Image (tube, rainbow, N blue to C red):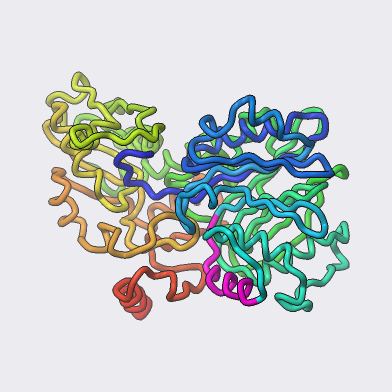
């Protein structure tokens, strides 16, 4: 479980490997271990030796799910893996990934990062045609769509492309899936003799390719997983691209394209590990620039700059560099408190934020502090955090947030799905400041955040910032809203 988090949580991390002669299950284990920050509820690995598929998955962290005993039966030379945080589908073992089924063409397994916004319609179409479903995840929908006969969806979309380097039945089915699927998806797909990697046409979720020493290739949600297993980063997949990893190496085909890319900007704010590379630059550098821009826009009279560990540390460093104020540690994180399924009792629960952080009194006593956080979503930890700083000796606490106010829900694989959950949708900045008890509060502006990203990357590839702006890159169906109140608010905002 995780205690007192107020960050949006990503759906999951995906990993895949084709590497004859390697222990691919062990390679996938360490790849998933590096992607653990993207999902902590369940983990799974599926392997294939070219004849049969082998699977193990369970609830918990990667190191809790796997051990020597259950890794050793996962034989083969290709594998995919997944670490999950539930968005569509509850936290239950039946929803753990990868999904695995047997088809007339052999085993098919799928690991998915993202959410399909038309999952309801796709699910109904499958059920009407007699396809049974055993889970509530849209990942199972992806798997069944890929396995379904062409007449279920219309044979006209199941056509070979003469430009494809390899006429491939699974490649054709993947492209057909792209024609009917809407929303966010980065996929790792395993068949009996190949691993496929797929990004949605908008590129909402990240995916990259790496090469192993001695032969073989891997795909992963982030480059940090490549570094962990000693793979060389080759490139990021393009939006809409379909890759095939097999004995011939790497084949790439151009899948469905969108007019503009829309990578989730929260990858730069919070989701991705700071040592990962996206858009050609390290995430840490982008976050530092966000901190610098925040200092330009919203400085304060203070003595020190403190970041909420660990996610806001780069932002705080950039803020300190720009403002000329010293950066210091003011909080120590109890790093393993969120890595247990043991629930705190009532007395411990009352300790609140202290379960996760301790204040460094020697650094804070008598100091006017600028406290940097990367985001505020629900606002349930900001007040206790400010109070912890005061209890640890800070004379003033000025909270600065290195992203804009989160005012709109996300439907593309992030766990903020209703307007009523979002504190910035209900209150303005002075009201939020009063509620959390800070001496002052300010946020990085939306233009400032986008400028910081462009400054470091040197280009504007196209991003989704809908949770800040309310401008979604795709049409959001009404059924995704939790109740009529959310629907009414959303439609009113569209009219503004």
Residue 190 covered by magenta stretch: no
The residue located at (76%, 40%) in the rendering is 78
Outermost residue on the bottom side: it is 495
- Which quadrant of the structure image shows residue 262? bottom right
Q: Nearer the viewer, residue 293 or 212?
A: 212
Q: How many marks?
A: 0
Q: Quadrant of the C terminus?
A: bottom left
**Where is residue 305 shown, x and y percent of the image?**
27, 32
The residue located at (73%, 63%) in the rendering is 147
Outermost residue on the top side: it is 362
Residue 115 covered by magenta stretch: yes
**Where is residue 91 shown, x and y percent of the image?**
45, 50
The residue located at (38%, 53%) in the rendering is 448
Q: Quadrant of the N terminus?
A: top left
Residue 144 visible in the snapshot: yes
Q: Nearer the viewer, residue 64 or 267?
A: 64
In the image, residue 488 sits, relative to residue 48, either above or below, namely below
In the image, residue 119 sits, relative to residue 166, either above or below, namely below
**Where is residue 350 shown, x and y percent of the image?**
18, 37
Q: Nearer the viewer, residue 306 or 74?
A: 74
Please report the bounds of the magenta region as a residue range: 114-128
* Secondary structure character of the magenta stretch overall: helix
The residue located at (20%, 37%) in the rendering is 346
Q: Nearer the viewer, residue 44 or 259?
A: 44
**Where is residue 40 shown, x and y percent of the image?**
47, 40
Left or right: residue 383 versus residue 376 is left
Residue 16 visible in the snapshot: no
Left or right: residue 340 versus residue 97 is left
- Which quadrant of the structure image shows residue 417? bottom left
């Amino acid at each position: 479980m995780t205690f007192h988090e107020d960050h949006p949580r990503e759906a999951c991390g995906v990993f895949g490997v084709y590497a004859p002669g390697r222990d691919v299950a062990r390679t996938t284990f360490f790849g998933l271990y590096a992607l653990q920050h993207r999902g902590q509820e369940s983990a799974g690995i599926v392997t294939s030796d070219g004849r049969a598929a082998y699977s193990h998955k369970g609830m918990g962290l990667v190191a809790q799910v796997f051990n020597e005993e259950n890794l050793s039966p996962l034989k083969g030379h290709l594998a995919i893996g997944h670490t999950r945080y539930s968005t569509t589908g509850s936290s239950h073992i039946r929803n753990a990934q990868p999904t695995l089924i047997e088809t007339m063409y052999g085993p098919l397994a799928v690991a998915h990062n993202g959410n399909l916004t038309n999952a309801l319609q796709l699910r109904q179409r499958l059920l009407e045609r007699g396809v049974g479903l055993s889970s509530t995840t849209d990942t199972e929908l992806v798997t069944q769509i890929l396995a379904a006969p062409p007449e279920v969806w219309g044979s006209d979309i199941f056509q070979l492309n003469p430009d494809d380097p390899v006429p491939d039945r699974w490649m054709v089915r993947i492209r057909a899936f792209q024609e009917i699927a809407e929303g966010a998806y980065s996929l790792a797909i395993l068949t009996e003799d190949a691993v496929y990697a797929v990004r949605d046409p908008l590129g909402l979720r990240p995916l990259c390719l790496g090469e192993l020493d001695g032969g073989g290739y891997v795909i992963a949600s982030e480059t940090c997983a490549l570094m962990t297993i000693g793979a060389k980063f080759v490139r990021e997949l393009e939006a809409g691209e379909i890759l095939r990893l097999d004995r011939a190496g790497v084949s790439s085909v151009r899948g469905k394209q969108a007019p503009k890319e829309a990578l989730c900007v929260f990858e730069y704010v919070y989701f991705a590990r700071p040592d990962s590379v996206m858009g050609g630059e390290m995430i840490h550098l982008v976050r530092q620039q966000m901190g610098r821009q925040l200092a330009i826009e919203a400085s304060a009279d203070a003595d020190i700059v403190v970041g909420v560990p660990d996610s806001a540390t780069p932002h705080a460093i950039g803020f300190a560099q720009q403002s000329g104020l010293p950066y210091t540690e003011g909080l120590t994180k109890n790093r393993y408190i969120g890595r247990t399924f043991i629930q705190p009792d009532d007395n411990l629960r009352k300790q609140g934020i202290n379960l996760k952080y301790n204040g460094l009194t020697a650094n804070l006593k008598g100091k006017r502090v600028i406290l940097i956080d990367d985001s505020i979503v629900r606002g349930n930890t900001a007040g206790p955090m400010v109070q912890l700083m005061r209890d640890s000796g800070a004379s003033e606490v000025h909270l600065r947030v290195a992203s804009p106010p989160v005012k709109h829900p996300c439907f593309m694989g992030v766990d903020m799905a209703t307007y009523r959950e979002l504190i910035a949708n209900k209150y303005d900045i002075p009201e939020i400041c009063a509620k959390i008890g800070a001496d002052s509060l300010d946020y990085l502006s939306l233009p400032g955040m986008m400028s910081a990203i462009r400054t470091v990357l040197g280009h504007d590839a196209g991003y989704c910032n809908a949770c800040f702006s309310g401008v979604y890159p795709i049409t959001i169906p009404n059924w995704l809203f939790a109740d009529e109140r959310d629907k009414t608010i959303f439609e009113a905002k569209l009219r503004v």
